[in-house]
Amino acid sequence: MEIRPLTPTFAVSPQIAVEDVPAIAGAGYRTIICNRPDAEVPPSHQVAAIAAAAQAAGIAFVDNPVTHHGLNMDMVTLQKSAIDTSDGPVLAYCASGTRSSIVWSLAQAKDMSADDIIAATTAAGYDLGGMRGQIEALANR
């Protein structure tokens, strides 16, 4: 497991496993968001397995599967709501962390500058500079 913080209260990670959940809880995360569709992973890594482990560890779990071609504003809104209503730090995961970073970036467009969003994702290893126009457009909506 490789947790990459974007802010003090939000981090992304490549795919997590059931056995990672106790360490996630131990690190203080209060909500896990899954941005990976079940069709991409074996049953041992699907939503039901990770959600059950999260529940057993006392962590809220949100299923918000994102595909590169299917990303829409409902997904962005759900991600933002999960972040905003969490009672502590949030960890979102997908295959590499990129989709989770993209959804977070779009969700933060009204709250952070495009420069700050891109700097945060770049520092975590995700170059989203090519999304500046989309982030700025959402900020001005």
Image (spheres, rainbow, N blue to C red):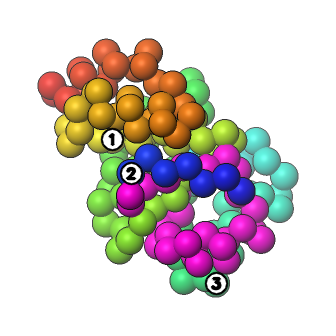
Determine whether label 1 and label 3 are within 8 Å by CB: no
Range shown magenta: 8-33
Camera-nearest residue between 51 and 113: 113
Q: Earlier in the sequence, mark 2 or mark 3?
A: 2
Picture quadrant where residue 136 is located: top left
The residue where tag 2 is placed is 7
Q: Is residue 14 magenta?
A: yes
Does residue 14 lie above or below 131 as drawn?
Answer: below
Q: Amino acid at mark 3?
A: Ala
The residue where tag 3 is placed is 56
Picture quadrant where residue 104 is located: top left
Q: What residue sits 77% from the left and 58% below the top?
A: 45
Camera-nearest residue between 49 and 93: 93
Say which quadrant the N terminus sits in: bottom right
Camera-nearest residue between 119 and 36: 119
Does residue 63 lie above or below 108 as drawn?
Answer: below
Q: Amino acid at mark 2?
A: Thr
Distance from the alpha carbon under mark 2 to that under mark 3? 26 Å
Picture quadrant where residue 131 is located: top left
The residue where tag 1 is placed is 107
Q: Earlier in the sequence, mark 2 or mark 1?
A: 2
Q: What residue sits 24% from the left and 21% below the top?
A: 137
